[in-house]
Amino acid sequence: MRILVLLLFATSLFAETPVTALSQEKEPKAKLSGKLAAAYLDHVSTDWTQTRRCFACHTNVFYMLARPKIEGGDKAPLKASRDWLEQSVAGWEKKLPKPDYNVLAPAMALAAHDATTGKLSEVTQKALDYCWTLQKADGSFNWPKCDWPPQEHDDYYGVAFMIVAAGLAPEGYAKTEKAQAALDKMRGYLKKNPPPDLHHKAMLLWGESLVGDILSKEEKNTIISDLKKLQQEDGGWGLPSLGTYKRRDKEKTPNDPKAPSDGYGTGFVVFCLRQAGVPSDDPAIQKGIQWIQNNQRELGCWFTRSLNTNRFHLITNAGSAFCVLALDACGIKLKCE
C-alpha cells in the first residue's frame, strides 16, 4: 500500500492549516477547535476519494456521519463526497463493483449521511437494498480480510458494520421487508459466532441501540463494564486494548494492550457507550471527553498509531471522526469559528 500523498486545497482554510494523513505521534497538541477538525476531516476524506476512488472504514466512511456534526465551514468537500457516492451507485444498475466491500462501504456512508438529515434518500435505499443481495447464507458478507484491524480484517466486523448501516438509515428503513430479512440473517450469524474481541462487542452496542434484539440486557451490561475497566488513568482508551492485533511491520509482535490512550480508542468507546445509554455525566464518559478535549493535534486530528505499520497512521482519520461524534453525543458542539 503506497503512502498517501496529500495535496493541499487552495483555500485560506488549508493555507492556515496544513493537513496530512501522515500524522505523527509527536505532533504538537492544540486547543480544541472545530475549524481544525473540519479542515482535517474534509481534506483526508476528499483526497482519499479522489485518489483511491472508493470509501473505506479507516478513512472516509464515518466522515459522512461526523462532518455534519461540526457547525459551519465550507460544506463543499462534504457535498463532493456525497455526489461521488450517488454517482457511484447510479452505475451499479449496469454492474456492481468488486469486491463486495465497494458496495457495502458506500451504502453505509450514504446511510450515515442520511441519518444526519433525518431523510432517507432514494439512492441510499437502493444502495442498501443492493447490499442484501450480496449477503451469504450464514448472514455474513465477503468482507475484506486484508489484515487491517480493527475494521477490515474479519467477517464479524462486516456483520456488525451492516447492522449499524441498516439502523442508521432514517425513516424506518430497518423495518422494511428487505432489511428485516437481512437483519434476521445477521442475528443468526451472531448467535453462531461469538465476537472475537471487545472492539466488535462495542460495535454491537451501537447496533443494539439502532435496531434492537442484538444483545441481551446482561450481555449489554457486561460489555459496558468491560469497556470501562480498560479506561486508562488519563481518561482515555488505547485501541490496542480492544483486541489482540499482531503487527505487519518489522516488529511483527502483538500490539501492547497498555499502549497510551489514542483518538480512535477514546472516541470510539465514548461514542459507543453513549449509544448504549451510558449518561453523559457518568464519570467514565466525563473523563473520556476531557481526554478528547485535551488531545487534539495542531493538524486538527486526534492521533492513533497504526496497528500495522509506522509508515502511516490512517486509522487516525476514523479515530478523529469518532472523537467528533463522541463530543456531539455528549452535547459538545464543535463550530468552525
Image (tube, rainbow, N blue to C red):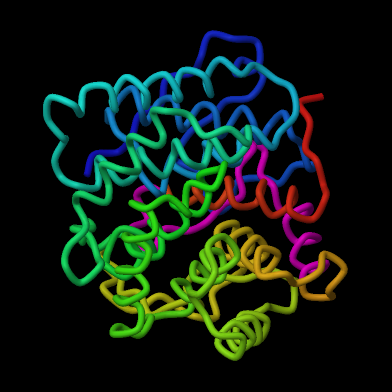
In the figure, 288 relative to 174: above or below? below
Residue 286 within the segment the image draws in magenta:
yes
In the figure, 200 relative to 7: above or below? below
* Residue 312 appears left or right of 69: left
Image location (x, y in percent) of residue 83: 42, 19
* Residue 283 appears left or right of 81: right
Point out the residue furthest to the right here. 281
Quarter holding residue 220: bottom right
**Measuring 27% from the left and 67% from the top, which residue is drawn there?**
154
Report the front residue among 24 and 143. Answer: 143
Viewer can see residue 44: yes
Image location (x, y in percent) of residue 313: 42, 50
Tell me the quadrant of the picture where the C terminus can be found: top right
Image location (x, y in percent) of residue 178: 33, 51
Point out the residue furthest to the front here. 177
Report the front residue among 78 and 232. Answer: 78
Secondary structure mainly formed by the magenta segment: loop
Residue 8 within the segment the image draws in magenta:
no
Quarter holding residue 110: top left
The magenta-colored residue range is 285-313
In the figure, 236 relative to 152: above or below? below
**Measuring 54% from the left and 28% from the top, which residue is drawn there?**
42
**Measuring 35% from the left and 43% from the top, which residue is drawn there?**
128
Looking at the rendered structure, the number of numbered marks drawn on it comes to: 0
* Residue 18 appears left or right of 288: left
Tell me the quadrant of the picture where the N terminus can be found: top left
Report the front residue among 114 and 70. Answer: 114
Image location (x, y in percent) of residue 43: 51, 26
